[in-house]
Image: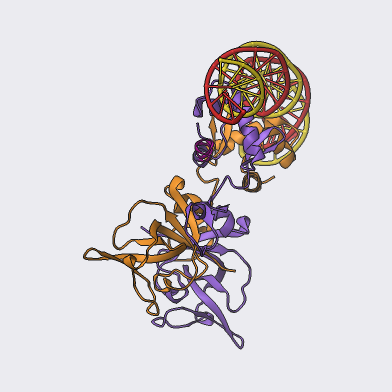
Chain colours: A purple, B orange, C yellow, D red
Amino acid sequence: MLIETQIEKLRSHYRRCGTLPTYNEMKNLFSYKSKSTIYYLMNRLVREGILRRKDHKLLPGKNFRGFPYFQSVRAGVPGPAEEEANDHLSLDQFLIDKPLSTILIRVRGDSMIGAGILPGDITIVERTGSAKPGDMVVVNLEGEFTVKTLRREGDAFYLDPSNPNYPSLPMAGYAEHSLVGVVRGVVRKFS
Amino acid sequence: MLIETQIEKLRSHYRRCGTLPTYNEMKNLFSYKSKSTIYYLMNRLVREGILRRKDHKLLPGKNFRGFPYFQSVRAGVPGPAEEEANDHLSLDQFLIDKPLSTILIRVRGDSMIGAGILPGDITIVERTGSAKPGDMVVVNLEGEFTVKTLRREGDAFYLDPSNPNYPSLPMAGYAEHSLVGVVRGVVRKFS
DNA sequence: TTGATTAGTGAACAAATGTTCACTATTTTA
DNA sequence: TAAAATAGTGAACATTTGTTCACTAATCAA
């Protein structure tokens, strides 16, 4: 069996189960008859950096999780070489720097359309105690989450939309308002 | 130690290592003296659905990977209750339906700004042999990746930008052109 | 075809894993 | 306070793990 196929089988298993298969499971997964075959195979994958070992335990390596990532466009002659990814990227790892204080919030409405945030997009929000003017923030206004850009004018704070059809909201206008966090990213899935 | 703290420690370990710690490792991680304490603790986490077991092996459960996810805005009275996520979401799992045929491509240029795709965004591209008119596609034009919307006019195909400053490109105008895939999603990280 | 290299086998092994048990310490309830 | 319930301990256990070894089968170059 092609080693690329085997790697993909490991990736699939890992995605499904959240863990690498044991040597015995791999034996069946790859249709081998001996555990030691797996052992040598895994050594090879460790050597290639796809997996790691930590006291006799097999772990995902650098490029195991994630997906082929084409960093930048390659100008020049097209050919099969360009089809090979230089790197792998996990969206979870890439997008979220502070896992312990990050939440995801789905956006409604088109008030931030000018900033490339469309209705239905999911924002990546880092829960912080404070934000500075210019930050894109999620604010809880009387029980409803709103995404806006924070602006300061003297001592007053305003929440600016990125859509000419909506007005800028003075924070002082809301009895109940609290900062949920700062928007660190956005994701969108097409239906 | 609070059980929530313990779960967060497990999550951290899992993010870092790509695997759950063993009972012995947990013993140290949680500062317990006996493995059987861990055993009972894990039973509890399994009962709560945070972890699963598959023939004596501990696996991440339903809400273990991923991040607190607030599906929709809750109108009504604000309060502590609304601060609790109903669900957890992994971006990798949510955004990518076909892991085996999906790649990530970083976008340059602002030709799709009207569709909410900004320069520097990463597109989630499903590699397909074909696309239908209306699909947002990545095309390899003479060695360079381009994101555009596919349009058909009679027998001719065009690549439409979402930016009035750019022209529509006739596919026939390029000696070397090939479909890379269909755009299924976009992600953006703020600096 | 020969010889050399690589890939796969199966038995044996020490170490580590999850599990069980009888027991003690701590906390909670009445 | 006493009684009941919960949380934690440590030794012992059967399994399973990854590992090693001597060996065979298959592949490839000359």
Q: Is residue A182 found left or right of A168 in the rendered image?
A: right
Residue at horizontal 63 percent and vertical 35 percent from the top: A44
Total numbered circles: 0
Give how far across and how far down residue A48 sits, in percent: 64, 41
Residue at 53 percent of width and 65 percent of height: A185
| Position of B169 relative to B36 (above/below) | below
Q: Quadrant of the C terminus of chain A?
A: bottom left
Q: Can I make out residue A58 in this image?
A: yes
Q: Is residue A106 visible?
A: no
At x 48%, y 70%, the residue is B118
Residue extending furthest left? B154
Q: Residue B170: name its quadrant.
A: bottom left
Q: Position of residue B74 (x, y in %)?
A: 43, 63
Q: Does residue A83 sit above or below D1 in this rendering?
A: below
Q: Judge left or right: residue A177 versus residue B27.
A: left
Image quadrant assignment for residue B178: bottom left
Q: Which residues are magenta?
A: A3-11
Question: Does the magenta segment cover residue B82?
Answer: no
Comparing C16 with A138, the one in front is C16
The reply, left or right, for residue B8 in relation to residue A143 is: right
Q: Position of residue A13 (x, y in %)?
A: 51, 37
Residue at 43% across / 83% down in the picture? A167
What secondary structure is the stretch in magenta mostly built from?
helix
Q: Note whether D20 is above or below B100 in the view shown.
A: above
Q: Position of residue B75 (x, y in %)?
A: 42, 66
Q: Nearer the viewer, residue A51 or C8?
A: C8
